[in-house]
Image: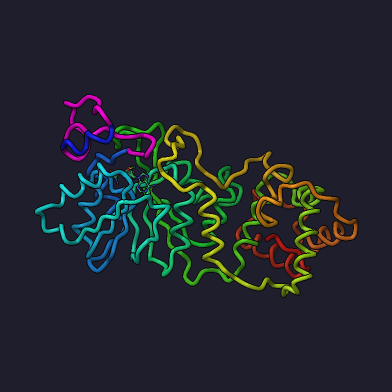
Amino acid sequence: MSGLRAAGGVAKKAGKKAAGGFSGIEFHKSKGQHILKNPLVVQSIVDKAGVKSTDVVLEIGPGTGNLTMKLLERAKKVIAVELDPRMVLELQRRVQGTPYQNQLQIIHCDVMKVQLPYFDICVANIPYQISSPLTFKLLAHRPSFRAAVIMYQHEFAMRLVAKPSDPLYSRLTVNTQLLSRVHHLLKVGKNNFRPPPKVDSSVVRIEPRNPPPPINFLEWDGLVRLCFGRKNKTLGAIFRQSNTLALLEQNYAVAQALHRAADGAEVDLVGAINRLAMEGGSSGAGGGAADEGGSDDEMDEGEEGGAGAGGPGGIAAGGSARRRRGKASEGFKEQVLEVLEKSGYIEKRAAKLSQDDFLALLAAFNQAGIHFA
Ligand SMILES: C[S@@+](CC[C@H](N)C(=O)[O-])C[C@H]1O[C@@H](n2cnc3c(N)ncnc32)[C@H](O)[C@@H]1O
């Protein structure tokens, strides 16, 4: 397989057998290349995914094709999006001359840069660097699909399925669960991969809510970003911050000027989720070391990343939000605190609020003409 050796220069340990049953391939950590070598895990993923014989399956990052071959046994068609030309060659070689040859379509591209085709179900062991933007790219995809069964870094997976009060409950959690139902399927130890990543992994099932909730997602994310900027502080403390109030008052003035309806006017869910998806960067080759145990969760500002820094960046348009602003008026501050008081959230903390709480809070603010995007 000289093609496989070429791109990486000299293949390390050329004599050693690598995943997929061929020798000499050098896996690139920068592309998240951790090949699933345990056939039992591969089979389990395909079984749990519930792939039907009529399904078009989207696979992201097929690598050497261990999962792809099993998917081809079950599905009508597999569309595999792969960035690395060496992997594309290997996959082509693997299906050539088999009955599956005509069922496989390979798209040689960065998944974050391509318009995804129609698919019924996505099954993938993805490069962990793009976990967050890829998840939201999928959730913004139309027409919607039945499910995505995806291998993530274990901690990232736990964030997706977290419940209020869990330590990993975060902005990522509430945004994902707003748009989908998420279930943990299977924990996969690092030794099932070649080369083994530094952390364990988990397979998660994501079922998009269809139809999606009829809310302005940018507004939603603006509120949630603000609240999770300091998730253990009371909302009263967060909304008393002068930067936050100043930004909200500016949004308020714009909304008034535009005569925007109190319940939020235009709902461009797909556009809004797409904007969010692109926040996390666009390439899997960017080198983030998600498998080193670091978090690639682009959605968590952390406890101290709140109002003063990037926190409320989401509550006003673009970079202008970061500029210094004047103080909000006392009248506006009272208005904001009254909404929190009357809705019963002033002493509550984001870490313990449910999906329904955030929806109720957003509705209460919007009714008072206060907007987050
Ligand atoms: C974790 S490996 C999974 C390989 C294979 N599916 C398996 O389970 O053994 C991730 C794969 O995604 C590919 N990849 C990395 N970044 C990508 C991107 N932005 N778009 C498409 N594929 C990408 C890598 O080249 C690699 O083949």
In which quadrant will I find the N terminus? top left
Horizontal side of residue 115 vs 314, given as left or right: left
Does residue 327 appear anywhere in the picture?
Answer: yes
Q: Position of residue 327 (x, y in %)?
A: 86, 51
Question: Coloring scheme of the render?
Answer: rainbow
Which residue is located at x 57 percent, y 47 percent? Answer: 299
Total numbered badges shown on the rendered structure: 0
Which residue is located at x 62 percent, y 43 percent? Answer: 301
Q: Which portion, as a residue range, is magenta?
A: 9-33
Which residue is located at x 25 percent, y 39 percent? Answer: 37
Does residue 231 appear anywhere in the picture?
Answer: no
Q: Is residue 350 above or below residue 363?
A: above
Q: Is residue 11 magenta?
A: yes
Q: Position of residue 237 (x, y in %)?
A: 79, 47
State the residue lying farthest toward the left: 97
Q: Position of residue 127 (x, y in %)?
A: 38, 43
Q: Position of residue 46 (x, y in %)?
A: 27, 54
Quadrant for residue 340, please give it. bottom right
State the residue lying farthest toward the right: 330
Q: Is residue 255 magenta?
A: no
Of residues 18 and 109, the one nearer the viewer is 109
Quadrant for residue 259, please give it. bottom right
Q: Is residue 2 above or below residue 126?
A: above
Magenta-highlighted stretch: main secondary structure?
loop
Horizontal side of residue 156 vs 49, given as left or right: right
Of residues 51 and 317, the one nearer the viewer is 317
In which quadrant will I find the C terminus? bottom right
Which residue is located at x 68 percent, y 47 percent? Answer: 311
